[in-house]
Image (spheres, grey):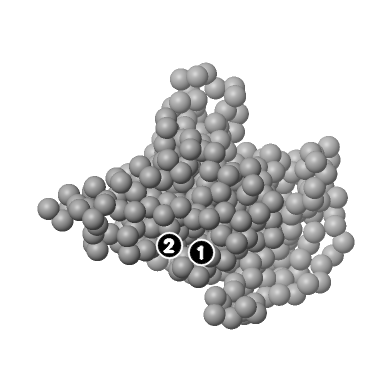
Amino acid sequence: MALEISRQYLKFVDDELIRLWRLGRNAVVAWSPTEEGLDVLAVPQYLLPNLFNNHEEILVGSMQRNAEELAVISDICEIEPYRIVIPAAIRSNSIGTKALEYLTRRFGITKLANKAVVLFDIVGFSRYSPLEQVTALNSLSYSINVAYQRTVENGLDVSLCHSTTGDGFYVWNRADGVDANIDLFCFLMLVLADNSLGQQKGLSTTVPVLRTGFHVGDCFEYFLAEGARPGTGSYIVGNATIQLARMVEIALQNQILIGDFNVTVRDEANPEPSMGGYDAAAFLERAQKRLLEFKDVNLSREKVSGIKCYLTGHAEADGTFNICRYRFSDKHDFQHSVFNAKVNVYRANNDQIFLGRLTKDLEEFAADEIVLRANAAAGATDAAEPVPRTAAE
């Protein structure tokens, strides 16, 4: 009986949100529980850029607010919340915040701050026949599913989301925080390993050659309509996806690019920036420690005993290696910078698979090279002058 009441409660709220949503004209911005049901603030989509241009923090995190917070947001929007009154017969105290948050989230736009996103792009996709295109996408999707299963089996917190780009996928982790970003990076390594092992066993048009990007940045999550209501699958757009698209545009086949991100972690209880921030090099060091947990992982019907990933550079006189940053301009003349990554996959039979490209294999990479000293990952800022490198060289 309680389960049936909960189901009716959620259906009633969902139907009311659909009315407020008005086929996508409005977006739910915030909600607050009341004794009778919910107060929901819905704002016309076309007003969002003007209303929240200086208040994007309102769109970050959970949409649930207390009554005072909802009143403040309502004043900013100059729109009164709509009260959803639940019929007394189906009111339930067993409805958790998580269920209501999921319902309302589908009708709004959420800002995802410092979110790690992966972009997989299939090389030469347009030259495939239609059937080969479908097969290549299914092969990549299979590697994604296998990698997801292996991350879960190893206890990582991965709530996977992905959306298609036509010739690849954006993938992100719904879980938040640096640990969730590291978990997604480990997932990326498993996808690339499974894809590479599959290439050695399948036809070239069956298991696709990839070029891959990883970046941490801000983006907005939204849900497209399916008929007269929002769908269950989300999409993202924003700084992170734009950076990834530009990175992959210039990437060579089999290349793995890491964005030049620098994240400042803030403590909600302390408005000042904390010391818990990280840049790309520091992030990779932390991710490599997490990768040590993946031993004897089954991928493409064989065991992988270990995975190592590092940012490439040149050998120094003392035998260490520096790190190279690469800078390029996109078609709009905006500047971007990235790092080139290399991955070593250790198989149980002691063979190795090398993914990505070494620095010496980047002659056709159309970006300027900036050599950072070996201690750059520890925060040093000294660097040599850019070394021009173009596709024409």
Count the labels in the image: 2
Q: Amino acid at mark 1?
A: Leu
Q: Nearer the viewer, residue 356 or 31?
A: 31
In this view of the protein, can residue 340 be seen by the observer? no
**Residue matched to label 2:** 32
User: Mark 1: which secondary structure?
Assistant: helix
Residue 354, percent from left and from top: 54, 50
Kindly identify the residue that appears in the image at 52 percent across and 18 percent down: 129
| Mark 2 Cα-neighbour bin, 10 Å: few <14, some 14–19, many ≥20 | many
Task: Work out whether residue 304 or residue 69 is closer to the camera in this orientation and state it.
Answer: 69
The residue lying at 42 percent from left, 36 percent from top is 229
Q: Earlier in the sequence, mark 1 or mark 2?
A: 2
Q: Position of residue 356 (x, y in %)?
A: 59, 48
Which residue carries the number 1 mark? 70
Q: Position of residue 292 (x, y in %)?
A: 44, 66
Confirm or deny contact between disc 1 and disc 2 (CB under 8 A).
Answer: yes
Q: Amino acid at mark 2?
A: Ser
Quarter in which the C terminus is drawn: top right
Q: CA distance from mark 1 to mark 2?
A: 7 Å
- Residue 79 in view in this figure: yes
Q: Which residue is drawn at the image coordinates 57% and 66% (left, top)?
A: 72
Residue at x-position 80% and y-position 47%? 334
Residue 68 in percent (x, y) is at 50, 70
